[in-house]
Amino acid sequence: MKILLLGKNGQVGWELQRTLAPLGKLIAIDQEDLDLVDTRAIRSTVRAVKPDLIVNAAAYTAVDKAEEEADLAMAINGFAPGILAEEAALCRAVLVHYSTDYVFDGTGKIPYSENDKPNPLNAYGKTKLEGDKLIQEKDMPHLIFRTSWVYGLRGSNFLLTILRLARGKKEVSVVNDQFGAPTWCRMIAEATSMVVSRGIKDIWAYTESNRGLYNLSAAGQASWYLFAEEILQLASGSDIKCRMINAIPTSEYKTPASRPFYSLLDNSKFNKQFGFKLPAWENSLALALCDYH
């Protein structure tokens, strides 16, 4: 099986390089190799590689900056996945793509299922939703994994931000009225490869029978405040100066982009279809910080 991985240097993409490599011939590329704003370049790259599987881990993920660069975010998060789906259908390749909990407005009270109606509050969520729609409109095998609060030990994310602040400040303030499921990028990559490996003999036929949108996030729930508390408890050491975390409401932490207050995902469809689930977010965080130490 020939696999084309986009976004190899991102959080999920970096982990996917390791987990996908044993499954076939892996061609991993990033922004310097392919500009996802250039639709002709996307088409020519796919046609040159002729993959059996395309895994799109590339995305515009700067949620606040997307408010100013909505067109750029739409090109990368919305239109590019649609082009990838078109090209995948032409070369008879399967497309795996990643979505976000931020397609929801957060007014719900129970975890969102794949059937709940999206209503994104910000430009980032709108562009990711457009990508989902364009893929789903194409009559070809695809898997869209919708995840949440992704973090890891590289790039830009909440975990690294808290660790940086904790090394320089004695106390930090963190929002305590937004709820979701912190999800380690390595778990997303591991789950993706486990699913893909089951169809290694005929990925097209396997995905055709399992195609669709699936929620894929860590078990359990947290607020950003609880997430930060757990980070500091697990990462306590001589370089950590912070001894207090202040819980604050969203109203006291203004950002250019609005966030949903509640964006927990119901993973039961994925768990039932593929026969396994991601660990509790606390367990994954402990494993992630073992690597940090």
Image: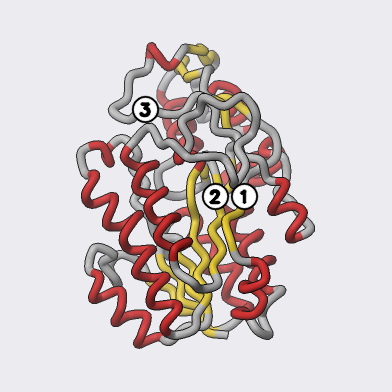
- Taking the spot 51% from the left edge, 47% from the top edge, the residue there is 153
Foreground: 242 or 255?
Answer: 255
| Displayed quadrant of residue 47 | bottom left
Dot 3 amino acid type: Ser
Dot 2 amino acid type: Arg
- Taking the spot 62% from the left edge, 73% from the top edge, the residue there is 208
Dot 1 amino acid type: Leu
Q: Is residue 281 left or right of residue 85?
A: right
Residue identified by numbered label 3: 258
Q: Which mark is residue 216?
A: 1
- Taking the spot 60% from the left edge, 34% from the top edge, the residue there is 264
> Quick one: label 3, few (<14), some, or many (20+) residues within 10 Å?
some
Where residue 183 appears, as percent x and y from the top left, is 59, 43
- Which secondary structure lies at badge 2? strand
Does the CB distance between marks 3 and 1 fall below 8 Å?
no
Where residue 163 appears, as percent x and y from the top left, is 48, 32
- Which secondary structure lies at badge 1? loop
